[in-house]
Image (cartoon, rainbow, N blue to C red):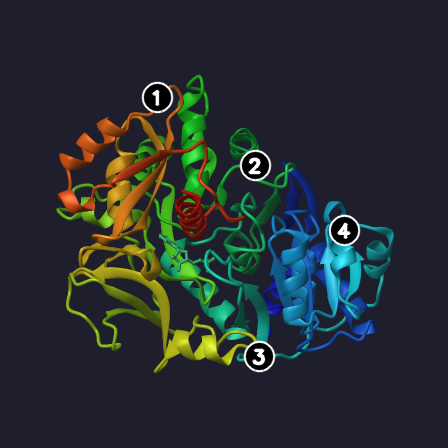
């Protein structure tokens, strides 16, 4: 089934319900959203774009985003969502690799994007006169698609190496949507999914569950993540559902805590965090400040949004004897996938042992676009090898350690940077931290830390060293502290450990 049927269904069943709000202002009903997607699909067809053709979408979180996305599925074509924070040169790579026939671009990005569109890639600017013209085309019926036909190409955020195009099928996205209802949140028609994180990534993928239930979608006027604006929307729109990276949750909590006590988070129905590690200290603060709305998911483009989930009842069950361990975990396998921890040969490991996390099920990609070697490496015997390491407990809760390449091996002992980072983050002078391995003649590698001091705190490496020595094995403590103003992050807010490693190597070379 074509995933565009979800919007077609809601446009028929709930024509008068509000579908899209810009800020707190209603803009489109479901009937209007469906009609615009069908007309735009008609335009794509008229331009010769049909089933299987790729259409890139390089746009900030603008009000046309959802209709453009659904129009591409509606026409049977394949969306290639590109993070608007990427540089035009990175966009060019994606356009060439995917062989996009058309680039849909938001107006402010068009001047940079248009010149890099390869010959043969047409460009249509969202909201421009030609776009408004396209919306007047005769509507196209939803095109037939088989479950294993390609729906999207998602370019991995590339904290390592070149981005690879993850092939996501209609089956993958439909299964992801089913898991949303069973493992993440039940959706009510009054809910309002607010797009503060890039719609090209997880936030955008959660549109489907909300379209299916005929709930509201809110594009913030700022188009991004502004804590004050979100709290305002929580007050005026209410029942907000937000997908946020852990760094965003932290900023929201900071904002509420720093306020005059009037900031009220009760207008948030659900705040789903994931995409990177949430440190326990930050989570405890979030639970205290934001209350019972938090849910965690762990996924990756290769099994979109769907590996494990830590449900709100687990986060809130403080009386459970293993609550402290559980809130440090990423939860249990979502309902349509199987999750294992395996050794280097792919054999399942016993409870408590650390190995690579693998996943199998309806959400797992069939492979990478035009990249059989990488596909064969990632998919072995039907299991997706995530590149993340972790361990399972007896109840099936998965605790992530690190991406396998982030592991530091010092004198033959494994050091999981996450563990050291958790300890350092609990120190009052530390705002952010990243621990990596530095090549060392004696030990092979030693851990070193990059630290951002909390506002008003003085850098004091000796104090951190004493703090670590009091709480962890001696060999795990960082041998050097680099105090920095900010950590390098990619456009999704993930810390770029590759950049930190490259910086260390350059510094050593120049000595
Ligand atoms: P991406 O494919 O860009 O979504 O990146 C996926 C990667 O982000 C995963 O393989 C993990 O390394 C990391 N990740 C995603 N969710 C979580 C989470 N809840 N906790 C820790 N790391 C996560």
Q: Secondary structure at mark 4?
A: helix
Mark 2 or 3, closer to the camera: 3
Q: Which mark is residue 149?
A: 3
Mark 2 or mark 4: which comes first in sequence?
A: 4
Q: Quadrant of the N terminus?
A: bottom right
Mark 2 or 4, closer to the camera: 4
| Figure check: 447 above or below 285 | below
Q: Secondary structure at mark 2?
A: loop
Reading the image, the residue beneath label 1 is 457
Q: For marks 2 and 1, give the CA distance.
A: 38 Å
Mark 3 or mark 1: which comes first in sequence?
A: 3
Pointer 2 with pointer 3, Cβ within 8 A: no
Mark 3 or 1, closer to the camera: 1
Please state if 367 lies on the left or on the right of 71 as rendered.
left
Mark 1 or 4, closer to the camera: 1
Please state if 54 lies on the left or on the right of 388 as rendered.
right
Question: Which residue sits at x=66%, y=56%?
Answer: 89
Which quadrant of the figure shows ligand 1? bottom left
Q: What crowding class fits label 3: few (fewer than 14 Cα within 10 Å), some (14-19), or many (20 or more)?
A: many
Q: For marks 3 and 1, give the CA distance.
A: 54 Å
Q: What crowding class fits label 4: few (fewer than 14 Cα within 10 Å), some (14-19), or many (20 or more)?
A: some
Q: Secondary structure at mark 1?
A: loop
Q: Which mark is residue 294?
A: none
């Amino acid at each position: 089934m074509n995933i565009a049927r979800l919007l077609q269904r809601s446009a028929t069943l709930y024509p008068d319900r509000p579908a899209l709000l810009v800020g707190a202002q209603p803009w489109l009903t479901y009937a209007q959203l469906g009609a615009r997607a069908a007309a735009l699909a008609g335009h794509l067809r008229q331009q010769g774009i049909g089933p299987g053709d790729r259409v890139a979408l390089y746009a900030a979180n603008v009000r046309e985003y959802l209709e453009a996305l659904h129009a591409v599925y509606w026409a049977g074509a394949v969306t290639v969502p590109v993070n608007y924070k990427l540089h035009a040169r990175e966009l060019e790579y994606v356009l060439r690799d995917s062989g996009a026939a058309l680039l849909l671009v938001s107006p402010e990005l068009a001047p940079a994007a248009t010149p890099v569109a390869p010959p043969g890639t047409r460009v249509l600017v969202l909201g421009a006169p030609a776009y408004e013209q396209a919306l007047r085309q005769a509507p196209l019926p939803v095109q037939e698609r088989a479950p294993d036909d390609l729906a999207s190409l998602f370019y991995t955020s590339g904290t390592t190496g070149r981005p690879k195009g993850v092939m996501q099928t209609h089956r993958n996205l439909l299964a992801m949507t089913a898991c949303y209802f069973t493992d993440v949140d039940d959706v009510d028609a009054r809910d309002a999914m607010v797009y503060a994180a890039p719609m090209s990534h997880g936030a955008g993928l959660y549109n489907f569950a909300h379209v299916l239930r005929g709930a509201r979608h809110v594009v913030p006027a700022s188009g991004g993540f502004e804590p004050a604006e979100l709290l305002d929307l929580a007050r005026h729109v209410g029942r907000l559902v937000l997908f946020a990276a852990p760094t965003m949750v932290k900023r929201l909590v900071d904002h509420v805590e720093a306020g005059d006590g009037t900031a009220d988070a009760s207008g948030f129905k659900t705040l789903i965090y994931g995409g990177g590690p949430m440190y326990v200290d930050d989570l405890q603060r979030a639970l205290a400040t934001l209350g019972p709305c938090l849910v965690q998911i762990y996924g990756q483009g290769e099994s979109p949004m769907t590996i494990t989930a830590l449900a709100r009842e687990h986060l809130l069950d403080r009386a459970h004897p293993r609550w402290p361990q559980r809130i440090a975990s990423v939860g249990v396998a979502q309902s349509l996938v199987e999750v294992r921890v395996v050794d280097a040969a792919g054999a399942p490991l016993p409870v408590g042992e650390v190995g690579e996390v693998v996943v199998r099920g309806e959400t797992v990609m069939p492979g990478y676009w035009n990249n059989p070697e990488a596909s064969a490496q990632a998919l072995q015997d039907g299991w997706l090898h995530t590149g993340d390491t972790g361990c399972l407990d007896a109840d099936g809760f998965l605790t992530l350690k690190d991406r396998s390449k982030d592991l530091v091996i010092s004198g033959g002992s494994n050091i999981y940077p996450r563990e050291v980072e958790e300890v350092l983050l609990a120190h009052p002078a530390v705002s952010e931290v990243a621990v990596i391995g530095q090549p060392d003649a004696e030990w092979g590698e030693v851990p070193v830390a990059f630290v951002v001091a909390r506002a008003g705190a003085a850098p004091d490496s000796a104090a951190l060293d004493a703090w670590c020595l009091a709480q962890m094995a001696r060999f795990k403590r960082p041998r050097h502290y680099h105090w920095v103003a900010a950590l390098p992050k990619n456009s999704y807010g993930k810390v770029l450990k590759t950049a930190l490693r490259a910086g260390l190597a350059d510094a050593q070379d120049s000595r």
